[in-house]
Image: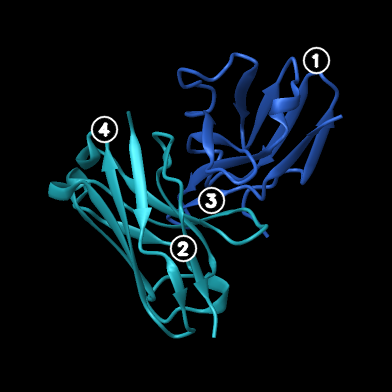
Amino acid sequence: QSVLTQPPAASGTPGQRVTISCSGSSSNIGSNFVYWYQQLPGAAPKVLIYRNNQRPSGVPDRFSGSKSGTSASLAISGLRSEDESDFYCAAWDDSLSGRVFGGGTKLTVL
Amino acid sequence: EVQLVESGGGVVQPGGSLRLSCAASGFTFSDHYMDWVRQAPGKGLEWVGCSRNKARSYSTEYAASVKGRFTISRDDSKNSLYLQMNSLKTEDTAMYYCSSVTAGYWGQGTLVTVSS
């Protein structure tokens, strides 16, 4: 059971907008930055969003992050077939003195 | 170009030990907090532990699942991060990634298999 809660699966058709949620608590998302990672099959994770809503250079602006209270969201607009992968949220947890990850969301592009 | 290259993975028997290494380049390693993150086959990401930088006295933190068995160290003069794993269990079988989670830098991982 992960400290951060994500839906195990999400789906959409090409061109659609999809949102993936990440729910935590006051000791993690509520007081620390949220990071989002994309993991393609057989590859290492790649950062999509850092510090809640910042996009590294090279990440398309189709990806956006937001945070409100103890929850965060990753939005993907203009869905493309190559977006089909696993997505993870992460944050530091002050109570655990450690980093926590969500269980991951498998995105399917129909 | 930022690179993190892990090495040292392999097959080990339960109760055995293994030392993983991570060689960093392309960024100022000494400034960064560094993490080890693992992923069991077919499972999600699990944080193993981290080493803070010199400014934070190289202090370390560990996940409860590995505390007392695993030790993280670093050598800034060699731009290297290490993970000493003792008393290994079958549930430690995973791909182990070296990462600066907050900077978004990840290696390609090294596979550790604990099996008799």
Nearest-to-viewer mark from 3 and 1: 1
Q: Quadrant of the N terminus of chain A?
A: bottom right
Of the numbered discs 3 and 1, the one sitting upstream in the chain is: 1
Of the numbered discs 4 and 2, the one sitting upstream in the chain is: 4
Residue nearest the observer in this picture, B112 or A23:
B112
Subunit ID for the residue under disc 4 = B
Residue A65 sits above or below residue A15 on the image: below
Subunit ID for the residue under disc 2 = B
| Residue occupying the point 85% across, 23% down | A13
Nearest-to-viewer mark from 3 and 4: 4
Which secondary structure, mark 1? loop
Subunit ID for the residue under disc 3 = A
Q: CA distance from mark 4 to mark 2?
A: 26 Å
The residue type indicated by label 2 comes to: Ala
Q: CA distance from mark 1 to mark 2?
A: 40 Å
| Chain blue in the figure, letter | A
Residue lying at the far left of the rendered structure: B77
**Residue B65: mark in rendering:** none
**Residue B63: mark in rendering:** 2
Residue B88 in the image, given as x and y percentages of width and height: 45, 78
Query: Residue at label 3?
Result: A100
Nearest-to-viewer mark from 4 and 2: 4
Residue nearest the observer in this picture, B79 or B30:
B79
Query: Residue at label 1?
Result: A15
Mark 4 neighbour density, 10 Å: few (under 14) some (14–19) many (20 or more):
some
Q: CA distance from mark 3 to mark 1?
A: 32 Å
The quarter of the displayed image where residue A109 is located? top right
Query: Residue at label 4?
Result: B27
Which secondary structure, mark 4? loop
The quarter of the displayed image where residue B32 is located? top left
Residue B51 sits above or below residue A87 on the image: below
A89 on left or right of B30:
right
